Amino acid sequence: MTLTEKKALAKEAYKAAKAKYLETMSKQDWVAFCDAKKVCMLLGVII
């Protein structure tokens, strides 16, 4: 898997986690959202 593919997958996961958190506002979804954002930041994805 190339870096570009990893970045695309990370960005999609971030968007999904953000949407789910905004829908439910639960602590568990907040943690998942933060983890997804961290992965994006580590890969250098601009969100």
Image: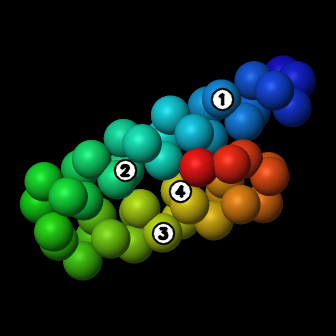
Task: Return the mark for residue 34.
Answer: 3
**Distance Cα–Cα, label 1 vs label 2:** 14 Å
Which amino acid, by three-letter code, is at mark 4?
A: Ala
31 shown above or below 43: below
CB of mark 3 within 8 Å of CB of mark 2? no
**Distance Cα–Cα, label 3 vs label 4:** 5 Å
The residue at the far right in this view is 2
Task: Return the mark for residue 36.
Answer: 4
Name the one closer to the observer, 26 or 18.
Answer: 18
45 shown above or below 4: below
Q: Is residue 40 left or right of residue 35?
A: right
As helix, strand or loop, the secondary structure at mark 4 comes to: helix
Q: Label 1: which residue? A: 8
**Distance Cα–Cα, label 3 vs label 1:** 17 Å
CB of mark 2 within 8 Å of CB of mark 4? yes
As helix, strand or loop, the secondary structure at mark 3 comes to: helix
10 shown above or below 27: above
**Distance Cα–Cα, label 2 vs label 4:** 7 Å
Residue name at image x 65 percent, y 29 percent: 8
Which amino acid, by three-letter code, is at mark 1?
A: Ala
Label 2 neighbour load within 10 Å: few <14, some 14-19, many 20+: many
In which quadrant is the N terminus drawn?
top right
The residue at the far left in this view is 24
Residue name at image x 13 percent, y 54 percent: 23
CB of mark 3 within 8 Å of CB of mark 4? yes
Which amino acid, by three-letter code, is at mark 3?
A: Cys
Q: Label 2: which residue? A: 17
Label located before the other in sequence (2 or 4): 2
**Distance Cα–Cα, label 4 vs label 1:** 12 Å
Residue name at image x 68 percent, y 48 percent: 46
